[in-house]
Image (cartoon, rainbow, N blue to C red):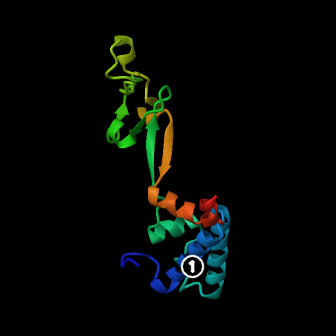
Amino acid sequence: MCADSDIEFSESWILIWIFKYQSRFRHSEISISSLIGFFSQVLKDADSKRFANFPSSSYSAKKLLRIDKATKTYAVCLKCNNLYKIGEILGQNEQVTEASPGLKCSRVEFPKHLMKKYREVCGEELLKNVPVNNGYIKRPRIVFPMPDLKTQIFTMYQRPNFEQNLAK
């Protein structure tokens, strides 16, 4: 447990056990959030001073334990389904004063084709202007969350009868 954390190690084992319980028995995020809320209420009723900083939801528990969902989010071209890293197509706090056009898709399906018409760039808009109080902010038109490969493999191995299904 990190030294700058608000929760002592003696209480963090409860949260770690709850998340291991969720992983083992495949409980939904909603049920685990309810379970953490229940534990929070019971522990605060038992000793309000000791458990004053105990989280009341799975979101605050994950934030406290520094557990993050290992997913990468990509912007998607609506025309050709090409993926772009959002950080690369968006500038930091890119604020636009007027509705200006966004970045366009640069994918060429057949870059070495002999006929010129098959070497054309896709050109579909990747960003949209979202109005805010003092102008516009550029955001991807559509996003695609892709889970971490390690998480996907772990989930695949945890499926019931995984080894028996390999033999089929």
Q: Residue at x 41, y 22 (%)?
A: 122
Identify whether 68 is placed above or below 10: above
Q: Residue at x 43, y 25 (%)?
A: 125
- The answer to which of 7 and 22 lies nearer the viewer is 22
Q: Is residue 86 among what the camera can see?
A: yes
Identify whether 102 is placed above or below 3: above
Left or right? Give the position of 58 relative to 102. right
Give how far across and how far down residue 19 sits, in percent: 57, 72
- Where disc 1 sits, the SS reads helix
Left or right? Give the position of 47 relative to 141. right
Q: Which residue is drawn at 41% across and 75% down?
A: 5
- The answer to which of 89 and 159 lies nearer the viewer is 159
**How many marks do you count on the picture?**
1
Q: Which amino acid does label 1 sit on?
A: Trp
Label 1 neighbour load within 10 Å: few <14, some 14-19, many 20+? few
Q: In which quarter of the image is the N terminus?
A: bottom left
Which image quadrant for residue 26?
bottom right
Give how far across and how far down residue 18 sits, in percent: 59, 75
Give how far across and how far down residue 37 sits, in percent: 64, 71
Q: In which quarter of the image is the C terminus?
A: bottom right
Q: Is residue 134 among what the camera can see?
A: no
Identify whether 49 is placed above or below 95: below
Give how far across and how far down residue 143 sits, in percent: 49, 39
Left or right? Give the position of 35 relative to 155. right
- The answer to which of 51 and 109 lies nearer the viewer is 109
Residue annotated with mark 1: 17
- The answer to which of 137 and 83 lies nearer the viewer is 83
